[in-house]
Image (cartoon, grey):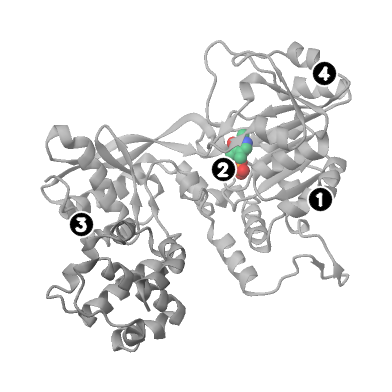
Amino acid sequence: MGWPDFKPGMGRLRSLVGSTPALFRQQFSESALELPASIPSVDRLLGTPAVLEQTERHGRPLVLELVRLLLAETRAGEHGRLHPQGEFDEAAFGAQLSARIGMVVEASQRRVLNLTGTVIHTNLGRAVLPEDAVQAMVAAARNPTNLEYDLARGERGERDKHVENWLSRLTGAQAGTLVNNNAAAVFIMLNTIAARKEVIVSRGELIEIGGAFRLPDIMARAGCKLVEVGTTNRTYLGDYAQAIGPRTAALMKVHTSNYAVQGFTSSVDEEALARLAHENGVLLLSDLGSGTLIELERYGLPHERTAREMLLKGVDLVSFSGDKLLGGPQAGLIVGNKGLIARINKNPLKRVLRLDKLRLAALEAVLKLYADPQRLSQALPTLRWLARSRDDIERTGQVVCAALKIAVGELVEVELVSCMSQIGSGALPTDLLPSVAVALKPNGPGKRAGRLVEQLAASFRALPVPVIGRIQDNRLLFDLRTLDDPSIMVSQLGQLDIGNVGR
Ligand SMILES: *Cc1c(COP(=O)(O)O)cnc(C)c1O
């Protein structure tokens, strides 16, 4: 198979193994002449024992693609070192193929250790599920379930019913519904209630979260007209009252999840807003963001407004996330007035945004844990980590610190330090939790401190279970709040390669 024939497949090959720009640079250059004298044909290589073994394990199509790719790279002069005397070395090629296949078949989404100090970390997958929820998900994954089947009557049922009763019990709501995430919940709520109408929001609450969730954009796509009132720091009841007109469908409160307006501020409580809304025949909606179901102060944490509290204040519909403080799977939960929930369920978008059986199973199991608040702080990882005492974290810290000192030797200074963890994902943005971290500081020259600590962080990310910390003042911090079992961290330190740190 000649070089030109090879080109059409390259796009796909490159996407599998990452780009090989050198190949393209050299494609027409003289260096292509520095090849091993005889490069075997693809067919011949496929018959060699090393390649046959890979075919046995991974199937012919993948092996064929990678053999072609590696041969093309070799022809382009990329792997001269493997075939030093200009003789094609089949054994070396086999080993190279095996390594490349390993890179391709390794799971892309992998377990990591989140030692960043942000407990609910969006980039690291937010809430970790309790064991009950994991079991429920596995059972639902392995088997058919009565997802939309009423076992008593033997007829079609409703998928949200498995969770709705729990939602009502835990929030006092008349009804509830579920969608893909809280962004979807806000979207379908607005689209159902206020399409082609106006929704009034305080300028102090026009949030952007994580780059892609901007309330004004969601509102526009939901077909609503946003009416902004007040100023960034102060909004009064009168501002809302003045803005209400014949086209107003709702007032909306949005939890300022990832910032706090401090100092000279004023905002209007839900109770007063609900009264105003209802006097004018419009609705009050609330995007609660993190939305917890329990009083967090009973676990020594700062108060975060609950869905029940919002409903008691007269809010008509409240939406919140399943995988933030709630500690469950990704989901958007909407609770409130029965008639309004029924309207949301009739919106064709509900079908677009519905939850699958796995997440419904996990959510049901998580909500069930809330029935027993005594056990909750042990059973729910998110809450357990948030409520964990500094002393307990320090005990884990001592074990990890001692092991790290041995692992990094002279190159890096290791010490236990006090630090602050954050709750994350927009919950209680200004409340920090006292914690303990292991701090690592490379001993290299000061002017290279920034680069050295980056290299150190990279070497921890390269471990079999990548360890993710945070960099602060040229030190790498591993906050131990979210590390239950130090052995997962410690047992892999023998594989830590910090060869390029401190040189
Ligand atoms: C997090 C958040 C959202 C988005 O929720 P997702 O579940 O991530 O879709 C929307 N509004 C507020 C106030 C939030 O905090």
Dot in front, 2 or 4: 4
Instruction: Tell me the kind of residue under disc 4.
Output: Ile
Q: Do the residues labelled 2 and 3 touch (CB within 8 Å)?
A: no
Mark 1 C-beta to ligand 1 under 8 Å: no
Q: Name the residue under label 3.
A: 497
Q: Decide: marks 2, 1 in contact (CB < 8 A)?
A: no
Q: Which of marks 3 and 1 is nearer the N terminus?
A: 1
> Circle 1 — which element?
helix
Q: Is residue 12 visible?
A: yes
- The residue under the point 20% across, 79% down is 88
Mark 2 / mark 1, whichever is N-terminal: 2
Label 4 – label 1 distance at C-alpha: 29 Å
Residue 474 in the figure: left or right of residue 192: left
* Rendered image quadrant of residue 497: bottom left
First in residue order: circle 3 vs circle 4:
4
- Select label 4 or label 1 by which is in front: 1
Mark 2, mark 3: which one is toward the viewer?
3
What is the x, y in percent for residue 215? 65, 32
Determine which residue is flagged by label 4: 244
Q: What element carries label 4?
A: loop
Query: Few, some or many C-alpha atoms within 10 Å of disc 1 (few <14, some 14-19, many ≥20)?
Result: few
Q: Is mark 2 on a helix, strand or loop?
A: loop
Give the residue at mark 1. 348
Q: Which of marks 2 and 3 is nearer the N terminus?
A: 2
Mark 2 vs mark 1, CA separation in Å: 29 Å
